Amino acid sequence: MYTLPALPYDYAALEPAISEEIMHLHHQKHHQGYVDKLNAALSQRPEASLSLEQLLRQAKSLPEDIRTAVINNGGGHYNHSLFWQIMSPNGGGEPNGRLLADIVQKYGSFQQFVDAFSNKALGVFGSGWAWLMPNMDIVMTQNQINPIMDGEPSPILGLDVWEHAYYLDYKNVRADYVKAWWNVVNWPEVEKRYVSEV
Ligand code: MN
């Protein structure tokens, strides 16, 4: 059985960037829904004994009758579990150390990285995510796809740009959501993930 992780902060803690109402719905309805549907799809199946990451790393070669459910709901569980961790009420600012140095080396400055990542997030057509990979590439995926399903390392930063992530607060203006989101990015957590991947 896969289980919904508790939020590492209160539902209202990310205001004003993300409202308490969105966080309640996003965690308790959307994320819980992915967990429940994943468990339902894998009930009585040996694949249910795999860790979530093991499951997703072989998602595309799973039996056809569970493959789509794992990609959609297992992906949703994995992506949101990461998303809650890489945000913090004490977030924002810039990373430090090696991560900052490598961002600046690749993008020229931290601000140019922010612009590039934001543009990638704004360019996602429909529902999906923008990711920062350990090799400093910025990639997008549709729906609940995660790069690990294609054999890639785990992303170290991700931004949910499904409308459910921002519509109640920002209506159709995804750009304002993306701009505000930088104020809650938990850079120490991103740095921790970076150091463990490279
Ligand atoms: Mn979401």
Image: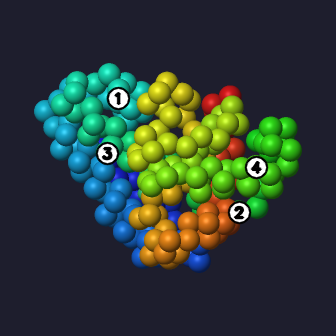
Q: Image point 29% across, 49% down: which residue? A: 35
Q: CA distance from mark 2 to mark 3?
A: 29 Å
Of the residues shown, which amino acid type is indicated by label 1?
Answer: Ala
Q: Image point 56% across, 66% down: which residue? A: 174
Quarter of the image holding residue 196? top right
Q: Which residue is mark 1?
A: 59
Location of residue 74 in the rendering, given as x and y in whole percent from the top left corner: 34, 41
Callout 2 secondary element:
loop
Front tag of 3 and 4: 4
Q: Nearer the viewer, residue 162 or 58?
A: 162
Count neighbours of disc 2 (C-alpha within 10 A) and say few if under 14, some if 14 to 19, many if 20 or more: some
Query: Does label 4 or label 1 sit earlier along the sequence?
Result: 1
In the rendered structure, the answer to whether residue 140 lies left or right of residue 41 reads: right
| Res 63 visible | yes
Q: Image point 51% across, 65% down: which residue? A: 9
Query: Does label 1 or label 2 sit earlier along the sequence?
Result: 1
Q: Which mark is residue 92?
A: 2
Location of residue 125 in the rendering, given as x and y in whole percent from the top left corner: 49, 52
Of the residues shown, which amino acid type is indicated by label 3?
Answer: Asn
Of the residues shown, which amino acid type is indicated by label 4?
Answer: Phe
Above or below: residue 179 compared with residue 97: below
